[in-house]
């Protein structure tokens, strides 16, 4: 296969703030794999929480360029198994390659990726749209600027109940709350009780990932479902989260791509847990890949291209929460001609 890497720094429409940090630019890396006249695209993101940078991602992938370019793709799963021992310490890098391999494989078969898996997309869930932490006035302004059926509200302030109370006055949309590890046990239980009457569907990662004792108590007493994010990174974490969370949010970048994500989905469902996939603010390349997992999912947060002021590619379209697949095969993502 032929390997090409494309680094990007894309601007956000608005400063994006969560409980840990704010940022105005999202660095991303797109990987392209070519074989037999077909091209596949994959994407991954930098992330300070996991100490991941685009230069480090490129270095990790380029260290295995000779192996990759000497490899002949049979199935994406076989390629993932071949690359895993080489990139076991960098799931973000493995993700970009795995997504590109899936895109390439489906194109060679002349099918959309979900068709390769025999899935029916007729009942796909809607995606939410994220409102980052800001002044209440600015958060209300963002709601009005972007009418949407489901919002994910980033929290982690001293005024979280007041924020949701005020936002509820301005929309009848469903709310999902994401605290990004910012709360403790008492705060989580108190907020859940208040949010239950304010149209909040669930709470995502209320407490630090290491606080399993706290999560056990919250799980047994919370009035709202709890979804793991930072507590569920790779496949081994699914079983760990059972009995501590009602569901898991799978990030393709964190777990190493579509190949392990599909296994995580099936395991979580076998345990009776809800399943969601989330965004790391990927552009349309990564978001188009996530879209093909939709028939498996209960919830999805794939609003990266909506939050960004710039994009890398054409692909899936998102309107009023509904995801529309691109016409092309594979994931449907095609890099803009400028790149």
Image (cartoon, grey):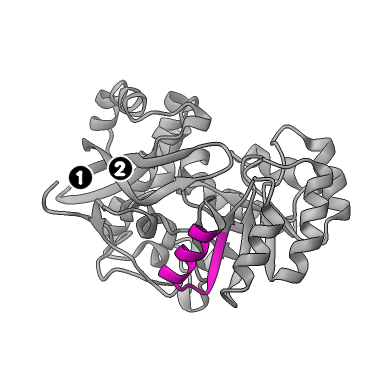
Q: How far separated are the C-alphas under marks 1 and 2?
A: 8 Å
Label 2 Cα crowd, 10 Å radius (few <14 / some 14-19 / many 20+): some
What residue appears at the point 72 percent right and 32 percent down from the top-left corner?
Answer: 210
In the displayed structure, 216 sits above or below 108; it is above
What residue appears at the point 40 percent right and 67 percent down from the top-left corner?
Answer: 115
Q: Which quadrant: the N terminus?
A: top left
Give the image quarter of residue 156: top right
For residue 73, the mark is 2
- The percent coordinates of residue 276 (x first, y second) are 58, 58
SS at badge 1: strand
* Magenta region, residue range: 137-152
Considering depth in this image, is 180 or 83 the residue closer to the camera?
180
Considering depth in this image, is 304 or 233 the residue closer to the camera?
304
Q: Residue furthest left?
A: 338
For residue 35, the mark is 1
In the displayed structure, 20 sits above or below 188; it is above
- The percent coordinates of residue 313 (x first, y second) are 24, 55
- The percent coordinates of residue 304 (x first, y second) are 40, 54
Considering depth in this image, is 252 or 113 the residue closer to the camera?
252
Labels 1 and 2 touching (C-beta < 8 A)? yes
Mark toward the start of the polypeptide (1 vs 2)? 1
Give the image quarter of residue 73: top left
Q: Residue furthest front?
A: 137
Is residue 112 in sight in this rendering? yes
SS at badge 2: loop
């Amino acid at each position: 296969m032929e390997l090409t890497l494309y680094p990007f720094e894309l601007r956000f429409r608005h400063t994006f703030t969560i409980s840990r940090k704010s940022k105005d630019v999202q660095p991303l890396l797109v990987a392209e794999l070519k074989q037999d006249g077909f091209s596949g695209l994959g994407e991954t993101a930098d992330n300070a929480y996991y100490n991941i940078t685009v230069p480090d991602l490129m270095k990790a992938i380029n260290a295995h360029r000779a192996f990759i370019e000497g490899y002949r793709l049979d199935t994406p799963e076989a390629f993932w198994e071949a690359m895993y021992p080489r990139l076991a310490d960098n799931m973000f890098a493995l993700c970009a390659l795995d997504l590109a391999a899936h895109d390439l494989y489906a194109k060679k078969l002349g099918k959309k990726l979900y068709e390769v898996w025999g899935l029916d997309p007729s009942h796909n869930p809607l995606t939410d749209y994220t409102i980052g932490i800001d002044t209440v006035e600015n958060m209300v302004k963002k709601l009005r600027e972007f009418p949407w059926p489901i919002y994910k509200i980033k929290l982690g302030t001293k005024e979280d109940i007041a924020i949701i109370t005020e936002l509820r006055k301005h929309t009848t949309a469903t709310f999902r709350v994401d605290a990004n590890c910012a709360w403790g046990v008492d705060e989580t239980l108190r907020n859940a009780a208040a949010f239950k009457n304010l149209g909040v569907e669930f709470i995502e990662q209320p407490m630090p990932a290491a606080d399993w004792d706290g999560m056990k108590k919250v799980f047994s007493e919370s009035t709202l479902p709890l979804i793991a994010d930072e507590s569920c990174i790779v496949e081994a974490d699914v079983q760990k989260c059972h009995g501590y969370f009602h569901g898991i949010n799978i990030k393709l970048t964190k777990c190493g791509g579509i190949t392990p994500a599909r296994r995580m989905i099936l395991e979580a469902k076998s345990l009776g847990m809800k399943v969601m996939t989330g965004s790391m603010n990927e552009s349309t390349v990564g978001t188009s890949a996530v879209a093909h997992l939709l028939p498996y999912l209960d919830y999805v947060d794939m609003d990266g291209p909506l939050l960004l002021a710039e994009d890398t590619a054409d692909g899936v379209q998102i309107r009023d929460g509904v995801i529309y697949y691109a016409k092309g095969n594979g994931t449907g993502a095609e890099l803009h001609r400028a790149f």
